[in-house]
């Protein structure tokens, strides 16, 4: 689950109520774009969203009650929301203090995003928020030592910024998954460019915990290849090792799996995962431009064929 920390400084502007209203609607589109990549993403703000002053004398509580904003607010109500930052930030050591500034102004949301190595999000209200990365300066006081440094914070104020960070969002969400069952349940957001044959659900739900990180990484690599695959290319460009099965094993029927239409088909291509001899079998569905996963589990042997794959 990716955390989005709201940059409270993006509310400090001299824009009109109409401009602030549109900026808020655009901000909702940013949150929607993140949720399309990670449907568990949460928005964290220092104060309740309803209490935000998004333009001089104009509060989000007023914006949400306007008829043109009701659908946007309906989404925001469904979005996982947390406040204040301390509900998700780890407590710092008692003898340590840190302060972050952007263009000389103290910033809380950007600080939290950097401390948690996650995403900051802003209303598109001013030029400083038009970048997908923001520079911040910070001062760290640890006992009697003072350290001054700068950092870059991952940031989004437009759906285009979200697209730049999509691979990172997807990988971060996947890294939070700790079981095969979670991989299956979150497959549509984590591996949106892959298809899965019917038997793969049981394969993942029965996946040993020790194999989850390796399978997760392999599926992310396959998803990246499928996403970038262009019509007309004979095969995706694999970022991980993907090879065909041997003729001997193919002839023994050890690479045949039930496809999504109920027919048995050959899934000769495979990649490996740890611990050995884990295999992910797949096939390239050229006519649909898709990559389909047929099996995830131990290397199938003639005398040990998983029941779900017979």
Image: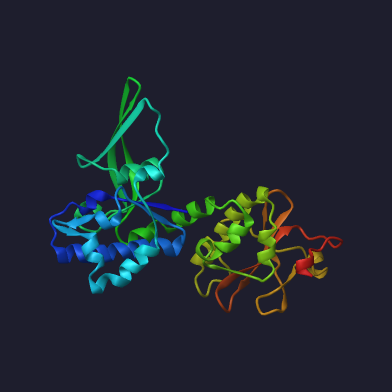
Where does the C terminus fall, quadrant-wise?
bottom right
Q: Residue at x 24, y 61 (%)?
A: 61
Left or right for 84, reference 304: left
Above-or-below relation of 225 to 212: below
Left or right for 136, reference 266: left
Whether residue 237 appears in this view of the structure is no
Q: Quadrant of residue 159?
A: bottom left
x then y, percent, for residue 225:
54, 63
Q: Quadrant of residue 205?
A: bottom right
Above-or-below relation of 196 to 213: below
x then y, percent, for residue 257:
73, 71
x then y, percent, for residue 296:
68, 61
Q: How many marks?
A: 0
Q: Residue at x 29, y 56 (%)?
A: 49
Whether residue 50 appears in this view of the structure is yes
Left or right for 194, reference 43: right
Colour setting: rainbow
- Of all residues shown, which one is farthest toward the right? 303
x then y, percent, for residue 228:
49, 65
Above-or-below relation of 268 to 112: below
Left or right for 80, reference 270: left
Q: Residue at x 60, y 62 (%)?
A: 184
The one nearer the camera, 1 or 148, is: 1
């Amino acid at each position: 689950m990716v955390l989005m920390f709201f940059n409270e400084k993006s509310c400090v502007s001299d824009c009109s109520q109409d401009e602030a209203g549109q900026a808020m609607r655009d901000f909702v589109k940013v949150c929607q774009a993140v949720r399309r990549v990670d449907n568990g993403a949460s928005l964290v703000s220092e104060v309740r969203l309803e209490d935000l002053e998004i333009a001089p004398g104009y509060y989000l509580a007023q914006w949400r009650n306007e008829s043109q904003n009701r659908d946007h607010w309906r989404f925001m109500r469904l979005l996982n929301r947390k406040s204040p930052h301390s509900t998700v930030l780890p407590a710092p050591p008692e003898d340590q203090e840190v302060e972050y500034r952007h263009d000389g102004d103290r910033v809380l949301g950007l600080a939290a995003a950097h401390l948690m190595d996650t995403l900051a999000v802003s209303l598109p209200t001013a030029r400083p928020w038009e970048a997908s990365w923001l520079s911040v300066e910070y001062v760290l006081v640890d006992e009697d030592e003072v350290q001054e440094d700068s950092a870059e914070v991952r940031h989004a104020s437009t759906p285009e910024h979200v697209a730049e960070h999509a691979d990172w969002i997807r990988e971060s969400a996947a890294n939070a998954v700790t079981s095969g069952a979670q991989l299956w349940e979150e497959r549509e957001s984590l591996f949106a460019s892959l298809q899965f044959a019917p038997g793969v659900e049981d394969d993942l739900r029965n996946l040993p915990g020790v194999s989850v990180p390796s399978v997760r990484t392999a599926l992310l690599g396959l998803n990246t290849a499928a996403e970038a695959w262009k019509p007309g290319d004979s095969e995706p460009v694999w970022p991980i090792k993907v090879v065909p099965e041997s003729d001997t094993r193919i002839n023994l029927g050890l690479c045949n799996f039930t496809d999504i239409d109920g027919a048995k088909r050959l899934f000769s291509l495979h990649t490996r995962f740890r611990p050995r001899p884990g295999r992910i079998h797949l096939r390239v569905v050229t006519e649909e431009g898709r990559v389909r996963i047929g099996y995830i589990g131990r290397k199938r042997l003639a005398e040990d064929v998983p029941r779900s794959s017979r």
